[in-house]
Amino acid sequence: MSVFTNMLEKLKKDETLIDIYRDEIVDNCLTGIISDYNDLLCYSSIVYEDGTEDGISIVKTKDITRLRWEGNARESLILLMKEKKTTLSKPKLSILTLREAIESVQNHFGYVDIHIEYMNDETCFIGEVEDIDDDHLVLNEFGTMSSRDRHRLLVPLDQISRIDAGDQYEKDIVFLSKNNR
């Protein structure tokens, strides 16, 4: 096993709070605990900077440029999590392929939040999977808080860099969409 794979396994086993960097596509990091990983995808349970639960995130393993753990920032976050009795979201998800990961997130959460950071690191689409194959996804997209307008979106799977679900913003968008009828 490589040093990278050995560290992923150790960090997962020890449930170590880490920062996951993907410097080549985004300027920020994801902070959380690795729930599962393989050569293709890394699934983490994410924490807000105030120590509360922030859903899950699945990224392509090849996009990970750095991992950071220990240190004052993460130790402070661990203290906040303990004080707030934070329980991280760690549903059993299949991450063998990107398609399976999307379907698994859809089945568990009832929606997916896909990011296409290779094109624009601030672009994501929240919605329900309408159709999917090994190459493309059709998403019945929810609108933003202001527009609440539904759209259909076709996107190539190879353009998806990250899959999220379970954070408060997404839950709010789903609620508003369901109550817009």
Image (cartoon, rainbow, N blue to C red):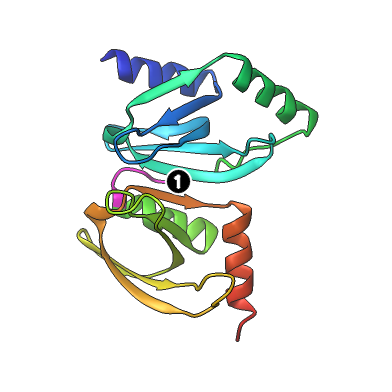
Residue 179 position (above or below residue 43): below
Residue drawn at x 61%, y 61% is 171
Q: Is residue 76 left or right of residue 74?
A: right
Tell me which segment is drawn in magenta: 93-98
Question: On the image, numbered disc 1 is attached to which residue?
Answer: 93
Q: Please give left or right for residue 31 compared with residue 60 in the image.
A: right
| Vertical placement of residue 71 versus 116, above or below | above
Q: Position of residue 123 (x, y in %)?
A: 39, 57
Is the residue 165 above or below the residue 19 in the image?
A: below
- Quarter of the figure with the C terminus: bottom right
Residue 92 shows up from this direction: no
Q: Residue at x 25, y 54 (%)?
A: 159
**Where residue 34 sits in the image (x, y, percent)?**
48, 30
Q: What residue appears at the point 58 percent right and 67 percent down from the top-left corner?
A: 173
Which kind of residue does numbered mark 1 sit on?
Leu
Magenta region, mostly helix, strand or loop?
loop
Reply yes or no: does residue 94 show up in magenta: yes
Quadrant assignment, res 77? top right
Give above or below for 150 relative to 106: below
Identify the image quadrant of residue 114: bottom left
Verify whether residue 118 appears in magenta.
no
Residue at horizontal 57 percent and vertical 52 percent from the top: 166
Residue lying furthest left:
135
- Residue 89: image x %, image y %? 60, 42
Q: Quadrant of residue 112?
A: bottom left
Left or right: 50 as drawn, with respect to 153: right
* Along the viewing direction, whichever of 100 and 68 lies nearer the viewer: 68
- Residue lying at the far bottom of the rendered structure: 181
Instruction: Please state, as top left, top right, bottom left or bottom right, where the N terminus lies in the image.
Output: top left
Q: What secondary structure is found at the residue carrying circle 1?
A: loop
Position in image of residue 142 (x %, y %):
49, 72
